[in-house]
Amino acid sequence: MSTSIVWKVTDLQRRLSDGYVFKAKYTVDASDDTYSFGGTGEMNFEEPEELKPFSQLEEEDVLGWIKESLGEEKVEALTKQLISAVAEQRTPTIGTGTPW
Protein backbone atom coordinates (compact mmCIF):
# COMPACT_ATOMS: atom_id res chain seq x y z
CA MET A 1 0.00 0.00 0.00
CA SER A 2 1.47 3.35 -0.92
CA THR A 3 1.58 6.40 1.30
CA SER A 4 1.12 9.87 -0.19
CA ILE A 5 2.74 12.98 1.22
CA VAL A 6 0.96 16.34 0.83
CA TRP A 7 2.51 19.72 1.69
CA LYS A 8 0.17 22.71 2.11
CA VAL A 9 0.69 26.35 2.99
CA THR A 10 -1.93 27.37 5.55
CA ASP A 11 -1.03 31.02 6.15
CA LEU A 12 1.42 33.74 5.13
CA GLN A 13 2.57 36.83 7.00
CA ARG A 14 3.66 39.73 4.83
CA ARG A 15 4.63 43.36 4.96
CA LEU A 16 1.72 45.33 3.51
CA SER A 17 3.86 48.09 2.01
CA ASP A 18 5.51 45.82 -0.56
CA GLY A 19 4.15 42.28 -0.09
CA TYR A 20 7.37 40.80 1.31
CA VAL A 21 6.39 37.41 2.78
CA PHE A 22 8.49 36.86 5.89
CA LYS A 23 6.71 33.87 7.47
CA ALA A 24 4.75 30.85 6.25
CA LYS A 25 2.78 28.30 8.23
CA TYR A 26 2.45 24.88 6.64
CA THR A 27 1.28 21.32 7.11
CA VAL A 28 2.76 18.04 5.90
CA ASP A 29 0.41 15.07 5.85
CA ALA A 30 0.99 11.42 5.03
CA SER A 31 -1.87 9.08 4.26
CA ASP A 32 -2.86 5.84 2.63
CA ASP A 33 -6.42 4.67 2.01
CA THR A 34 -7.03 4.11 5.74
CA TYR A 35 -4.44 5.80 7.95
CA SER A 36 -2.97 9.27 8.20
CA PHE A 37 -0.42 11.21 10.20
CA GLY A 38 0.78 14.79 9.87
CA GLY A 39 2.47 17.77 11.34
CA THR A 40 2.64 21.54 11.17
CA GLY A 41 5.47 24.01 10.96
CA GLU A 42 6.45 27.64 10.52
CA MET A 43 9.27 29.02 8.42
CA ASN A 44 10.75 32.51 8.44
CA PHE A 45 12.30 33.89 5.27
CA GLU A 46 15.07 36.38 4.65
CA GLU A 47 14.09 39.28 2.43
CA PRO A 48 15.11 38.49 -1.15
CA GLU A 49 16.83 40.97 -3.45
CA GLU A 50 13.88 40.82 -5.82
CA LEU A 51 10.30 40.40 -4.60
CA LYS A 52 7.70 38.52 -6.59
CA PRO A 53 4.43 40.49 -6.26
CA PHE A 54 2.25 39.00 -3.53
CA SER A 55 -0.73 38.75 -5.87
CA GLN A 56 1.34 36.58 -8.23
CA LEU A 57 2.59 34.11 -5.61
CA GLU A 58 1.43 30.54 -5.89
CA GLU A 59 1.48 27.86 -3.23
CA GLU A 60 4.24 26.00 -5.10
CA ASP A 61 6.47 29.10 -4.87
CA VAL A 62 6.16 29.20 -1.09
CA LEU A 63 6.49 25.42 -0.71
CA GLY A 64 9.72 25.70 -2.69
CA TRP A 65 11.01 28.32 -0.25
CA ILE A 66 10.03 26.14 2.72
CA LYS A 67 11.71 23.02 1.34
CA GLU A 68 14.80 24.99 0.33
CA SER A 69 15.04 26.47 3.84
CA LEU A 70 14.63 23.04 5.44
CA GLY A 71 17.17 21.46 3.13
CA GLU A 72 16.95 18.22 1.18
CA GLU A 73 18.11 16.01 4.07
CA LYS A 74 15.49 17.41 6.48
CA VAL A 75 12.72 17.07 3.88
CA GLU A 76 13.73 13.44 3.25
CA ALA A 77 13.93 12.71 6.99
CA LEU A 78 10.50 14.25 7.60
CA THR A 79 9.02 12.25 4.73
CA LYS A 80 10.48 9.01 6.14
CA GLN A 81 9.14 9.83 9.62
CA LEU A 82 5.63 10.40 8.30
CA ILE A 83 5.67 7.24 6.19
CA SER A 84 6.88 5.27 9.23
CA ALA A 85 4.09 6.72 11.39
CA VAL A 86 1.46 5.62 8.88
CA ALA A 87 3.09 2.17 8.61
CA GLU A 88 3.02 1.86 12.42
CA GLN A 89 -0.72 2.57 12.40
CA ARG A 90 -1.25 0.00 9.62
CA THR A 91 0.84 -2.72 11.32
CA PRO A 92 1.46 -1.81 14.97
CA THR A 93 4.67 -2.94 16.64
CA ILE A 94 3.96 -1.25 19.98
CA GLY A 95 0.98 -1.79 22.25
CA THR A 96 -0.38 -0.06 25.32
CA GLY A 97 -2.53 -1.12 28.20
CA THR A 98 -2.37 -3.35 31.22
CA PRO A 99 -2.91 -7.11 31.49
CA TRP A 100 -5.60 -6.91 34.16
Image (tube, rainbow, N blue to C red):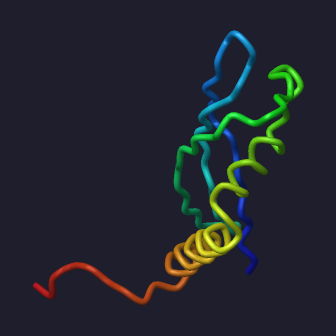
**Picture coordinates of residue 28, whole percent (x, y):** 62, 55
- 72 on left or right of 87: right
Taking the view exactly as shown, the residue that stands out farthest to the right is 56
- In the picture as drawn, the residue positioned furthest to the front comes out as 49
Quadrant in the picture for residue 5? bottom right
Image quadrant where one finds the N terminus: bottom right
Instruction: State whether residue 76 is above or below residue 47.
Output: below
Where is 56 relative to 99, above or below?
above
Closer to the camera in the image, 88 or 73: 73
Q: Residue at (59%, 35%) from the top-left corner?
A: 23
Displayed quadrant of residue 3: bottom right
Give the residue drawn at x 63%, y 40%: 45
Q: Is residue 20 left or right of residue 22?
A: right
The residue lying toward the viewer, choosing from 4 and 99, is: 4
Residue at 82% x, 28% y is 51
Give coordinates of residue 42: x percent, y percent.
54, 44
Q: Is residue 15 above or below residue 71?
A: above
- Count how many numbered circles sit on residues in the image: 0
Q: Residue 50 appears in which quarter of the rendering? A: top right
The residue lying furthest to the top in this view is 17
Which residue is pictured at 72% across the width and 57% down the height? 68
Tell me residue 22's x, y (percent). 62, 32
**Where's residue 53, x and y in %?**
85, 22
Task: Give the answer, above or below, for where 97 lies relative to 71.
Answer: below
Query: Can you say which quadrant of the picture contains the C terminus?
Result: bottom left
The one of 97 and 30 positioned closer to us in this rendering: 30
Q: Nearer the viewer, residue 45 or 66?
A: 45
